[in-house]
């Protein structure tokens, strides 16, 4: 088995959290290490959420301890974004900054670029990985909302599947509850994500409400992907996917709202009725640190209007406007012409 093993300054500074740190060269090496430690080691990529967990649990007086951390970011292909007309594939080491900078994501998965642009600050986005955002399983995770609207799938590897064909599963099946991922990071690895890129008359959009100062957590977020029929003056929604959060214990696809919108001409009347259905589906709650339930209920219609309007405009015109709004600071947009018409 070939993999790199090292002990760095971080281990010396935080010996109470983990003993050893490994950089495996392949996923099979990583799985072998996880099997060797039998539940007492865990996978790490960017590590930003894990470090916060260490800190918070240390303050609470019950710091976790792992025999080893298994860093998967040096595995071949882990830091790559690959795409063709059928699939866009994102490796487990791809950071939010890479997503935002990718012309492929900007034009063919625009909602994801917009979502990743508002996560944390530049320092966090340069380190934190998209798959880490998924694995943390929070119902308001910006990248996850966009991926859910894009009908993303996750590639999962485990010791029992070692050497067999890749296992791709719907992203929605990874979430059990707030902060509860169905993938056991001490025994399994989320290796990659994939989804279909938008094509002719298709587009996506993401919008978020947050406090307008500093590095803010989302109060409410929403993403959508849709396809319109060719119309000279009106936009008929042929297909649509909507994901919102936090309005449920897990990122919520608004299935009833989607079903209503299919085949409808986008209008004020349609939007009003869709909003009523969405408010029945969603169950936002009051958060002591972010917003009240009542305020979040008021935000849902606004976010639905913004995401649908922006996506429909992009789908009809073929021009992609990437929203690089950064944590409440003035909006910065870039227009990119989508060549797939």
Image (cartoon, rainbow, N blue to C red):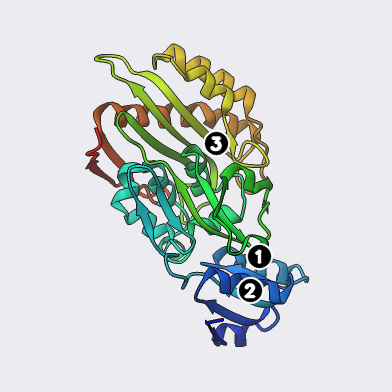
Q: Nearer the viewer, mark 1 or mark 3?
A: 1
**Total numbered circles:** 3
Q: Residue 1 lies in what quarter of the image? A: bottom right
Determine the secondary structure under disc 1: helix
Question: Are the residues at dot 1 and dot 2 in contact (C-beta closer than 8 Å)?
Answer: yes
Q: Nearer the viewer, mark 3 or mark 2?
A: 2
**30 or 338, which lies in front?**
30
- Where residue 29 appears, x then y in whole percent? 57, 74
Residue in the picture at 42% in, 52% down: 89
- Image: 3 above or below 79: below
**12 or 105, which lies in front?**
105
Marks 3 and 2, the one that precedes in the sequence: 2
- Where residue 123 appears, x then y in whole percent? 43, 66
List the residue tagged with mark 3: 244
Marks 1 and 3, the one that precedes in the sequence: 1
Circle 2 packing at 10 Å, graded few (<14), some (14-19), many (20+), is some
List the residue tagged with mark 2: 32
The residue at the far top in this view is 269
- Where residue 103 appears, x then y in whole percent? 28, 51
Image-based side of 188 in relation to 216, left or right: right
Determine the secondary structure under disc 3: strand
């Amino acid at each position: 088995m070939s993999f790199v093993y090292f002990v760095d300054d971080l281990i010396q500074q935080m010996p109470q959290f983990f003993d050893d740190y490994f950089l495996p060269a392949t996923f099979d090496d990583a799985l072998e290490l996880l099997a060797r430690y039998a539940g007492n080691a865990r996978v790490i990529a960017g590590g930003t959420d894990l470090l916060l967990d260490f800190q918070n649990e240390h303050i609470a007086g019950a710091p976790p301890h792992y025999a080893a951390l298994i860093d998967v970011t040096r595995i071949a292909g882990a830091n790559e974004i690959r795409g063709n007309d059928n699939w866009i594939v994102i490796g487990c080491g791809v950071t939010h900054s890479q997503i935002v900078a990718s012309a492929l994501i900007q034009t063919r998965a625009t909602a994801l670029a917009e979502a990743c642009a508002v996560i944390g600050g530049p320092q966090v986005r340069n380190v934190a990985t998209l798959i880490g955002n998924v694995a943390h399983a929070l119902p308001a995770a910006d990248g996850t909302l966009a991926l859910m609207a894009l009908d993303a799938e996750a590639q999962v590897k485990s010791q029992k599947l070692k050497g067999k064909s890749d296992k791709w599963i719907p992203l929605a099946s990874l979430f059990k509850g707030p902060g509860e991922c169905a993938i056991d990071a001490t025994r399994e690895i989320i290796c990659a994500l994939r989804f279909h890129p938008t094509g002719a008359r298709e587009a996506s959009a993401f919008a978020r409400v947050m406090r307008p100062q500093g590095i803010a957590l989302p109060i409410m977020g929403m993403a959508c992907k849709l396809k319109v029929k060719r119309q000279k003056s009106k936009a008929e929604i042929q297909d649509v996917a909507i994901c919102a959060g936090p309005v449920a214990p897990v990122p919520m696809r608004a299935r009833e709202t989607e079903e209503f919108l299919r085949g409808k001409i986008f209008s004020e009347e349609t939007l009003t009725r869709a909003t009523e259905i969405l408010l029945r589906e969603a169950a936002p709650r009051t958060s002591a640190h972010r917003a009240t339930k009542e305020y979040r209920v008021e935000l849902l219609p606004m976010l639905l209007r913004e995401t649908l309007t922006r996506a429909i405009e992009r789908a009809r015109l073929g021009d992609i406007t990437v929203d690089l709004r950064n944590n409440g600071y003035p909006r910065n947009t870039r227009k990119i012409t989508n060549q797939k018409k």
